[in-house]
Image (cartoon, helix red, strand yellow):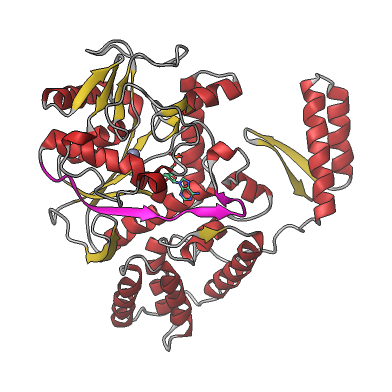
């Protein structure tokens, strides 16, 4: 297995610390809103990485945190707490928001065939561990208290910019949407380990600590949750490229300062999914979700295929035109596979040859597009159907595209954009009528649509429709 390592900026042969187990840590979602399909690009590619390792015979232990506290709207400790923002938006408690969006996240992952990690740990479960690591950092002189908060002192490190070049201006772009200089910091790059004198008096979640009642900073959670489940030496750490600075840079700073040795050997980063206006982000509000793709009639697996057809180290621009052509290709491919005869004996020698070929491409820094091309090669191979089906099923352990799930029936009739606009308008009118407790109008709208063969369905994510 070869993988590009952000730490060395080279493609390297992956060598785990122990042959017995690969320790893999993944930064999980901040659960204040639905995951958008950009976030999910990162999780799809991490899923491929995990499955490729398993396919090649490694035993992987994968750990993921759930950020349910401490992530401010700017990654550089300024702005508002994202969880509070979500709670206020929906008039709910922070924990209600966390529970709802954690469930929604795993439901989206399941629809995209993303395996749930072996360990999933919410940050709010690990307050004692955070306090322990922060206490150690204070003891060792790597942290200081100022204005009531505890900060990490980046000037105490021989090298702080381990993952990226020292170009602060460039690094801060996109991180500081909400610039608000913190006068307590001794150095510009210092970061908060524990907030007590918080500017958020209404912070819902607070815990007792040696430094007063407060709550943890964002970065400390990943260092501690990784330590708790994977120990002081880690093989592999993953995230999207926006995590490189400051989040992963700060994780390395605090973990290595605490342990006194190198922490993680390989850093894997997935490039962004962009829309026309740039990086897709939750804070922009207007973003694409899996449910929205479903509402528009796409099988979520088509989005997985869309992601696999480009390399994870290149930015990817989302477009419905490309998604449509992927959907058409996917349907043809599934239907070709469905037609393969199930009977016959499998040529295991050929299957082993193809497994080797698959590992040569997907195991080479996750060239998933070539992995998919290999599926087409198998269909053309000079062998019987049973062997073809066997090999494709084997590849699908990694690709997870439901390739052997049978024929795709003709999809429901698609609606033109004018009809779609009309339906959306009626759904909005009905929602307003329901809000105004005008159930008669709401029912009349539903009936009017039903008479035209448009059936409304009320789901937790909102109202969807089906054409009968
Ligand atoms: P968040 O829930 O905002 O903490 O992000 C969850 C994961 O999605 C992190 O690993 C981010 O780096 C990643 N991410 C955020 N935006 C994008 C995007 N537009 N494309 C790909 N990955 C993203
Ligand atoms: Zn993290």
- Above or below, 401 against 37 in this view is below
Residue 400 can be seen, yes or no: yes
Q: In what quadrant does ligand 2 lie?
A: top left
Which range of residues does the magenta coloring cover?
A: 261-279
In this view, the residue in front, 253 or 229, is: 253
- At a point 81% along the width and 31% down the height, the residue shown is 430
- Above or below, 271 against 159 in this view is below
The residue at the far bottom in this view is 382
Would you say the magenta stretch is mainly helix, strand or loop?
strand
Q: Position of residue 149 (x, y in %)?
A: 30, 18
In this view, the residue in front, 22 or 12, is: 12
Residue 315 magenta-highlighted? no
Placement of the N terminus among the 4 image quadrants: bottom left
- Above or below, 223 against 15 in this view is above
Q: Position of residue 404 (x, y in %)?
A: 49, 66
Left or right, 128 with respect to 75, comes to left
Residue 118 can be seen, yes or no: no
Left or right, 460 with respect to 52, comes to right
- Above or below, 29 against 439 in this view is below
Left or right, 424 with respect to 107, comes to right
- At a point 50% along the width and 77% down the height, the residue shown is 341
Q: Position of residue 356 (x, y in %)?
A: 29, 76
Which quadrant holds residue 173?
top left
Count up the numbered dots.
Answer: 0
Q: Position of residue 60 (x, y in %)?
A: 25, 51
């Amino acid at each position: 297995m070869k993988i590009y390592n952000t730490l060395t900026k080279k493609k390297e042969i992956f060598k785990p610390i122990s042959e017995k187990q690969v320790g893999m840590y993944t930064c999980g979602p901040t659960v204040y809103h639905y995951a958008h399909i950009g976030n999910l690009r990162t999780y799809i590619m991490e899923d491929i990485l995990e499955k490729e390792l398993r396919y090649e015979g490694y035993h992987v232990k994968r750990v993921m945190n759930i950020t349910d506290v401490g992530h401010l709207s700017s990654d550089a400790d300024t702005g508002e707490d994202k969880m509070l923002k979500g709670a206020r938006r929906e008039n709910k408690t922070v924990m209600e928001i966390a529970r709802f969006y954690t469930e929604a996240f795993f439901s989206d992952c399941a629809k995209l065939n993303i395996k749930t990690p072996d360990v999933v740990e919410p940050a709010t479960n690990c307050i004692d561990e955070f306090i322990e690591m922060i206490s150690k950092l204070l003891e060792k002189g790597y942290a200081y208290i100022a204005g009531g908060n505890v900060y990490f002192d980046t000037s105490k490190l021989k090298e702080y910019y381990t993952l990226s070049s020292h170009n602060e201006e460039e690094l801060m772009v996109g991180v500081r949407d909400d610039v608000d200089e913190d006068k307590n910091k001794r150095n510009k790059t210092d970061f908060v380990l524990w907030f007590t004198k918080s500017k958020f008096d209404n912070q819902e979640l607070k815990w007792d600590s040696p430094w007063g009642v407060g709550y943890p900073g964002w970065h400390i959670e990943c260092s501690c949750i990784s330590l708790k489940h994977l120990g002081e030496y880690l093989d592999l750490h993953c995230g999207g490229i926006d995590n490189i600075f400051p989040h992963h840079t700060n994780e390395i700073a605090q973990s290595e300062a605490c342990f006194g040795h190198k922490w993680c050997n390989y850093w894997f980063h997935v490039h962004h999914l962009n829309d026309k206006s740039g990086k897709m982000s939750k804070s922009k509000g207007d973003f694409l979700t899996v449910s929205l793709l479903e509402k528009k009639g796409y099988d979520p697996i088509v989005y997985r295929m869309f992601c696999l057809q480009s390399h994870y180290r290149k930015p990817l621009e989302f477009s419905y035109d490309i998604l449509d052509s992927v959907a058409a290709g996917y349907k043809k491919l599934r239907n070709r596979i469905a037609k393969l005869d199930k009977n016959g004996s499998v040529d295991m020698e050929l299957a082993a040859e193809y497994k080797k070929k698959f590992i040569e491409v997907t195991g080479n820094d996750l060239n998933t597009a070539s992995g998919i091309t290999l599926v087409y090669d198998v269909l053309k191979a000079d062998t019987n159907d049973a062997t073809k089906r066997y090999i494709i099923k084997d590849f699908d352990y990694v690709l997870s595209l439901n390739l052997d799930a049978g024929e795709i029936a003709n999809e429901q009739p698609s609606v033109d954009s004018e009809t779609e606009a009309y339906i959306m308008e009626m759904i909005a009118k009905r929602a307003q009528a329901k809000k105004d407790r005008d159930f008669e109008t709401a029912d009349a709208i539903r009936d009017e649509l039903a008479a035209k063969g448009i059936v409304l369905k009320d789901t937790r994510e909102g109202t969807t429709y089906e054409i009968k």
